[in-house]
Amino acid sequence: MNKLFVILFCFVFACVNAQQLKSPSKDIVVDFSLGDQGEPTYHITYKGKEVLKPSKMGVLLKDGNTLNKNFRILNVETSAFDENWTPVLGEEAVIRNHYNQMTMHLEQKESDQKMDIVFRVYDEGVAFRYEFPFENKAHYFIISDETTEFNLTGNHKTFWLPGDYDSQEYNYNETKFSEIDISKIDRNNGIALQSVESNYRVQTPLMLKSDNNLYLNIFEAAVTNYPVMHLDVDTANFTLASNLVPNAIGDKAYLRTPSTTPWRTFMVSDDARDIVGSKMILNLNEPNKIEDTSWIKPMKYIGIWWEMHVGIATWDYAGSQNAQNSLTKELLPSGKHGATTENTKRYIDFAAKHGFDGVLVEGWNVGWEDWFGNWKEDVFDFLTPYPDFDIEEVHRYAKSKGVKMIMHHETSGSVGNYERHLDRAMDLMKKYDYPAVKTGYVGRIIPRGEYHDGQAMVNHFNFVAERMADNQLMVNSHESTRPTGYHRTYPNYIAAEAARGNEFNAWSNGNLPSHETVLPFTRLLGGPMDYTPGIFEIKMSAYDPTKTEQVHTTLAKQLALYVTLYSPLQMAADLPENYEKHLDAFQFIKDVPLDWQISKYLEAEPGDYLTVVRKDKNSENWFLGAITDENPRKTEIPLDFLSPNKTYKATIYQDGKDAHWEKNPKSYTIKTETVTNKSKLKLTLATGGGTAISFMAIN
């Protein structure tokens, strides 16, 4: 590790109420000042242009203290930091963490209440947080709100989700800032708006583009022991104000000194690739806390999952959501239960044949007859299999084939029940050699009144990751809070969903063709996503002629997603029999790695297109993914990223000439070329299409 750490102390008299901090490149400048009433304010410029107008800062406490005015500056500390660190798994083998820092030590003039505001300025943006120092003894306090603002300079194009405290599973809305209005969006998108009282509240990360082609992103990092930040929208004044998710009685956060808030982040660049390729969110988290990480490994998996979404199998043994949920009364199998021993062996055979690491089985355990919407706290025990799932035999068979099983824990939102059973559930995983678990939190949270994005649930998701780490187990959370870089600290938190995934294409009006072009600028900034790509049978009418639902991409784009949507845990989500029909295209899924040495974002425009190339961590092979939205696209890619003095076999998986996401999604062609780093490739992407390329080193 190369590290440069310089601290400069600057003691400032109370009459000096302004300070400035620049990024290492000096392109980004943040100015901090105290107003006439001692109110903290910050202001950001980029290459001499104002990108964020003076914006208020501060915190409100439940006891009536207002930590947003009447401050004076006690002193200022500045520092510069530059290090290279190595993630356990990631898009890069080495990540640079380079920033300048300024800590404003503040004190209120009358109450002597102290608060620090810490700024870090990177070449791609600004981060700041509030810190509450320890003074003589611990002080307990309740946050009732923040007064953090982001005062924009104009009516920017905005990619936004409604501010639902319980779900991020929406299509992105692309409008002018002034046109944000939740009452006008399509609510028939697969789920109900769960907890949105305001038509003018949005989620972070929030991606924006100004009229002068600057790319902006508002997010947060290192959310621990604190609620998620949503944003209240003032469409007339182009202002966003922090909205912290409350708990069941309306409080926002319970803290004690010393403590900190999460980092509030504002990224800016005139090149969209700087935003999508940024590691700023990850860098703002604490370093890895797991000493032995040898057991944390990428996994490519298949599973008993998609067949339930397309309606040919059920999670529950009895085949009815209204069946009795008690084995003291006879439950007759429906004949459609997916998680049978026989069916699981079929998936294990397929995984072994094609070199997959794992098999996920959903619906293996008792409780699915009565799991959703009933506010029952003890539906699942995470231990008891259904009569037709022989966990001992499945373990024996998987081991004989060299395949690992992936556990599934659907909590139905009953958090207390899951925590009570967690140690026993982990013991079962270790007994039967399950290295990873997929957790689920569908439905309203129990205890009642808590939200998925509240402080209690943030603590729960992090607690599960930490307890899994204690037991050398990996976790992939679904329906969780969206990640904010915590996988740097606990790299066994290998993936999460926390966005609208591929399954919505099976039973709703689906994901927009632009959806996957927005996710890398938003959800994926905080961590890897279990999007479950790889659907080859695009139209659901293949299972039921009356169905009109379909995946809103071409087959070639489904391949490209393995590169454009980073995750060290990737599912080949379709049914084995659908892959058997297209083994030539399936070869890309088999070949593509999950852990990378280098990642380069070659082309990027949020909501429109993305082209990414990555180098395998363990070889000289490279892989490219290019995707587009509802518009067809042609582009030419120089291959200068390839290693010099080497020759590569390029296998190009591309849309057919007549491909179209809706009219002809399964049209694709495969061709091979011999290339070097002097070569160029012309790509033609169909409407809603994509291209995937493997570059295999020949010499």
Image (cartoon, grey):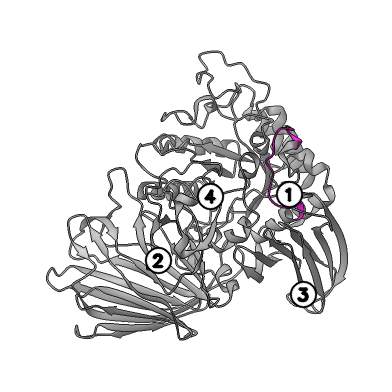
Q: Which residue is mark 4?
A: 170
Instruction: Of the two numbered discs 1 and 4 on the same chain, state the one appearing first in sequence.
Output: 4
Q: Which residue is mark 3?
A: 639
Q: Position of residue 79 (x, y in %)?
A: 38, 81
Q: Tell me the amino acid under the disc marked 2.
A: Arg
User: Mark 3 packing: few (<14 Cα in 10 Å), some, or many (20+)?
Assistant: some
Instruction: Of the two numbered discs 1 and 3 on the same chain, state the one appearing first in sequence.
Output: 3
Disc 1 versus disc 3: distance between alpha carbons?
A: 31 Å
Q: Which residues are magenta?
A: 542-556
Report whether 410 appears left or right of 682: left
Instruction: Of the two numbered discs 3 and 2 on the same chain, state the one appearing first in sequence.
Output: 2
Q: Which residue is mark 1?
A: 662
Q: Which residue is mark 2?
A: 264
Instruction: Of the two numbered discs 2 and 4 on the same chain, state the one appearing first in sequence.
Output: 4
Q: Tell me the amino acid under the disc marked 3.
A: Leu
Report whether 687 appears left or right of 74: right
Instruction: Of the two numbered discs 3 and 4 on the same chain, state the one appearing first in sequence.
Output: 4
How many labels were placed on the picture? Answer: 4
- Indicate the quadrant where residue 636 lies: bottom right
Q: Position of residue 38 (x, y in %)?
A: 21, 75
Disc 2 versus disc 4: distance between alpha carbons?
A: 23 Å
Say which of marks 1 and 2 sits in front.
1
Q: Nearer the viewer, residue 169 or 188?
A: 188
Q: Secondary structure at mark 1?
A: loop
Q: Residue at x 19, y 83 (%)?
A: 14
